[in-house]
Every structure is written in C-alpha cells, then in structure tokens.
Amino acid sequence: MTDDVWQAHLTHEAAREIGRWLEGRGAGRLQSPIASLTMADLEAMASNAISRWIVLQSERLARQGWPQDDPIGKLLLG
C-alpha cells in the first residue's frame, strides 16, 4: 500500500470513528448543527479519531516488522 493510499485509509477510518461518536450521542442529535457542538464534544471526536489512527498505525508497524528497539515502535507497539 502506498503512503498516499494509507493516508486516505487512515482519514476514512478516523472519519468513521467520528461518525460513530456522533451517532452515539443520542437519537436526533446527529441532525443538530455543528455549531451546537461543545469543546468537550470536539475533543471527544478528536480523541476517537486519534485512537483509531494509533491502532491502525500500530498494526501496520507490527506487520512490517518494525524494529523493537525503535522508540516510536516501543511507544506504539509496547
């Protein structure tokens, strides 16, 4: 998978997590204007998107045999 394709995949997955979070806010709230979101709402969406990125990137690094002594690998895979 090229870096561009991987980035597109990560973006899609992050957007999916944001959608799941919005849907989980309760029936009827998904149609609310974006201006009604609080900072806590935005932070929760960002946290879910970042978490999804970390999981996907960790899985990719593990598949690629990322060196275990690398600090980034230790952070993501440890």
Image (cartoon, rainbow, N blue to C red):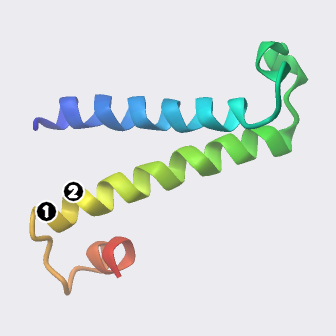
Mark 2 and 1 residues: CB-CB less than 8 Å, in contact? yes
Q: Position of residue 62 (x, y in %)?
A: 19, 67
- Label 2: which residue? 60
- 36 on left or right of 56: right
Q: Secondary structure at mark 1?
A: helix
Give the residue furthest to the bottom. 69
What residue do we see at 33% from left, 52% from top? 56
Q: Position of residue 49 (x, y in %)?
A: 54, 44
- Label 1: which residue? 63
Going by the numbered disc 2, the residue's amino acid type is Arg
Q: Which mark is residue 42?
A: none
Relative vertical location of residue 52 with respect to residue 74 in this rendering, above or below: above
CA gap between label 2 and label 1 equals 5 Å
The C terminus sits in image quarter: bottom left
Going by the numbered disc 1, the residue's amino acid type is Arg
Q: Position of residue 2 (x, y in %)?
A: 11, 35
Other residues around mark 2 within 10 Å, as few (<14) / some (14–19) / many (≥20): few
What residue do we see at 21% from left, 56% from top? 60
Other residues around mark 1 within 10 Å, as few (<14) / some (14–19) / many (≥20): few
Relative vertical location of residue 65 with respect to residue 53 in this rendering, above or below: below
The image quadrant that residue 40 belongs to is top right
What residue do we see at 31% from left, 55% from top? 57
